[in-house]
Amino acid sequence: MQKNIKLKNALFVPKHAYGILKATAFATYKEWAAYRSHMAVSIFVGPMYFLIQVYIWKAVFSSRGTINGLTLKQMLSYYGIAAVINYIVFDFADWNLQMHIRTGSFITFMLRPMSHRFYALSQKVGHRMLGFWVEFLPIYLLFLFVFKIPLIPVHPIWAVLSLILSFLMSFLVNYCVGMTAFWLTKADGVRRMFSIMNSILAGAFIPLTFFPAILQKVFFFLPFQFITYVPISVMIGSYKLGGIEATIPQIVFVQALAVLLMFFISEIMWRLGIRKFTGVGA
Amino acid sequence: MTSGFSVQVEAVKASLYSRMAYRGDFFISISLTFIFEFITPLVTLLIYSNGSSFPGWTLYQVLLIQGVFMMSKGIAFMFFYGLVGNVLGGVQSGTFDMFLLRPRLVLFMAIATGFDSEELGKFIGGLILFIVALIHLPTPSFIQWIQFILLMITSLLVMFSFSLISSGVVFVWVGCSRVYEIFDSISSFGIYPRTIFSKGIQNIITFIVPIVMIGFFPASILLGKNINGVLFGVISSISFVLLSLCFWYWMLSKYTSAGC
């Protein structure tokens, strides 16, 4: 059994990967579509938060033309892009996984002929497909036409690539957080800690260039900037952090390397964590 | 009244005992709640440390508003915002019926049993911010402190209204845990000085949905700032509570049991 589990999950790409992804994503889509009105809350909440940012930064910029090299228009673009990116990459793999491990229902996934990580990723694809038209699209159009925020990427192809990598990075980080339940059983504390770190260090609340230079250098080596800050920079067309300036292809390449590294970290955590898992019944 | 108080005390004790079963997790959760609440002050600090400011407001004046807001939110979430969770979970699972069967007011029981000790972190965070800000500001007079306490009561009334509205909504919008986000997004207008908003929004957040009563007005009293509209704000807050109460009971009447 143990050997089978390892075989099934170590760098395992199922034979019918596309079919599994499609079926899981579709089932998740249908499941969450029943709660689409809950998801649609974002259409109210997102613009409300953004409206506050508009007033904050209009007040702050009233006495200055630029702050940290950003104009008011660029600052509002930053927040607008940050908001819409969130609707594409949003993830709760950590909550799902820790819940399955804690309740023991995770054992049912061990019996399935596929990697749980791939299954969870497929679920996220389905969930975000629903989020695309219920959350992303209305808010994108609202920002574009009501708030007049330029949300057209400077380099569309690089932006799409960066968004895909950001999508994967947020999933892998959250999946690793969820895996801490193999050791801790109740991983709520770790989840909340990572959620706070992600809120601050990904650059969703304020551009990372507002932090002291030494902290920016530290942030460069953390995975969080690759979830929000990097895709925003790619959409805006320039990247700078902690004195490091990179062209768009360069930073997307670094982002890809970071995703690859995170994948291997998740693989190591899986191999170590699965040995700790004990489930009774199913 | 006395027995109502003892019910509240027993509910608080029961909540603390059950939470103490996982002491480590409890203290981690309080600490994380505490840290999470510092995100907004951190953003404010970063704005000021980059040489920018909100016109007419110093860093510590803004932090004072945010500290008062956090304290009010901390008290509210500890003592009566659990109402939302009780209604949300109870209606979804069908266990809300138990509140209807108890020999007390439904609203009172749903509030009393919703005590949440983890939210202490919010209050402590707000208190620390409040004290730090006050140390860097001129000392308020005795009269200002009295006015501040009165406005803090009004602030809690507004928070209570929000808990009534949020919990009322989930009687019909079953299982929608995102009501918290709706509250957060609306109340965020109260974390910053009112003067940064347009006149229209200022009027809305003072007279219609009196969000400025949560943090802005109590802090402004201590700062000796201009508090135009405070009296109307208080009247509006009282009206807001009464309307919220009517709304809650109206929504309760729409509750259809799912059985237990």
Image: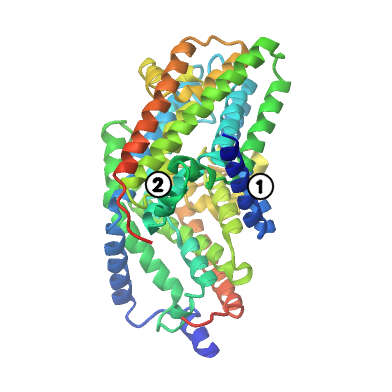
Q: Which residue is mark 2?
A: B178
Say how many tags the image has: 2
Q: Examine the rendered structure and indicate whether residue B142 appears above or below residue B204.
A: above
Element type where label 1 sits in the image: helix
Q: Which mark is residue A46?
A: none
The reply to whether label 1 and label 2 mark residues of one chain is yes
Image quadrant where residue B240 sits: top left
- If the image is split into quadrants, where does the N terminus of chain B sit? top right
Task: Tell me if I can see residue A167 in this picture.
Answer: yes
Q: Position of residue B250 (x, y in %)?
A: 31, 37
Give neighbour class at mark 2: few <14, some 14-19, many 20+ (Cα, 10 Å). some
* A134, B110: nearer the viewer: B110
* B82, A5: nearer the viewer: B82
Q: Position of residue B120 (x, y in %)?
A: 63, 42
* Amino acid type, residue under disc 2 in the picture: Arg
Which chain's residue wears label 2?
Answer: B
Residue at image location 60% in from the left, 53% down from the top: A193
* Amino acid type, residue under disc 1 in the picture: Ser
Residue at image location 53% in from the left, 65% down from the top: A178
Element type where label 2 sits in the image: loop
Q: Position of residue B94 (x, y in %)?
A: 37, 57
- If the image is split into quadrants, where does the C terminus of chain B sit? bottom left
Which chain's residue wears label 1?
Answer: B
Residue at image location 57% in from the left, 58% down from the top: A188
Q: Examine the rendered structure and indicate whether residue A166 appears above or below residue B79.
A: below
Q: Which residue is mark 1?
A: B31
* A269, B162: nearer the viewer: B162
Task: Tell me if I can see residue A236 in this picture.
Answer: no
Q: Examine the rendered structure and indicate whether residue A141 appears above or below residue B143.
A: below
